[in-house]
Amino acid sequence: MPIPEPDVAVPEGDVKKGAKLFKAKCAQCHTIEKGGNAKQGPPLWGVMGRPSGSCDFGYSEANKNSGITWSDKHMFVYLIDPKKYLPGTKMVFAGVKKEKERADLVAFMMEQK
């Protein structure tokens, strides 16, 4: 069953802080530069606006069949607790509980296209 876009307001984030957070929390498993390769997780260059499970990576069926097209709203809520938001995902990450940090990460990711 497709996951509908959340009805949330995404606070304005700080792109520079988001870049630092990405390096600290995400870069161990993901690349985000143009042409970056998959690591433990898929490359995230251009992820915003892309259907979940659509780039060259061994995604779970849950990701491929989620119906998600990544938006600021989906990503903002997903990052709270990925396994709860998308049951069956392979993403092994506890999540980002602080709203401001999630907003900063989303702002950074929105610019990587």
Image (cartoon, grey):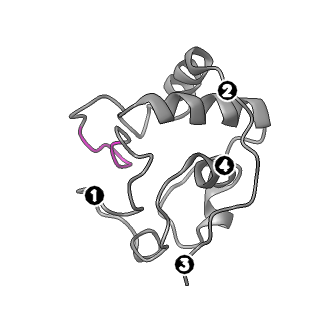
Foreground tag (1 vs 3): 3
Q: Which residue is mark 2?
A: 13
| Comes first in the chain, label 4 or label 1 | 1
Above or below 85: residue 38: above
- Identify the image quadrant of residue 31: top left
Distance from disc 3 to disc 4, alpha carbons, whole Å, reads: 23 Å
The label shown at residue 94 is 4
Distance from disc 2 to disc 3, alpha carbons, whole Å, reads: 27 Å
Residue 57 position, x and y percent, is: 27, 57
Name the kind of residue labelled 2 in the image.
Gly
Task: State if disc 4 and disc 3 touch (CB < 8 Å).
Answer: no
Residue 61 position, x and y percent, is: 40, 76
Residue 47 shown in magenta? no
Name the kind of residue labelled 4 in the image.
Ala
Q: Which residue is mark 3?
A: 2
The label shown at residue 112 is none
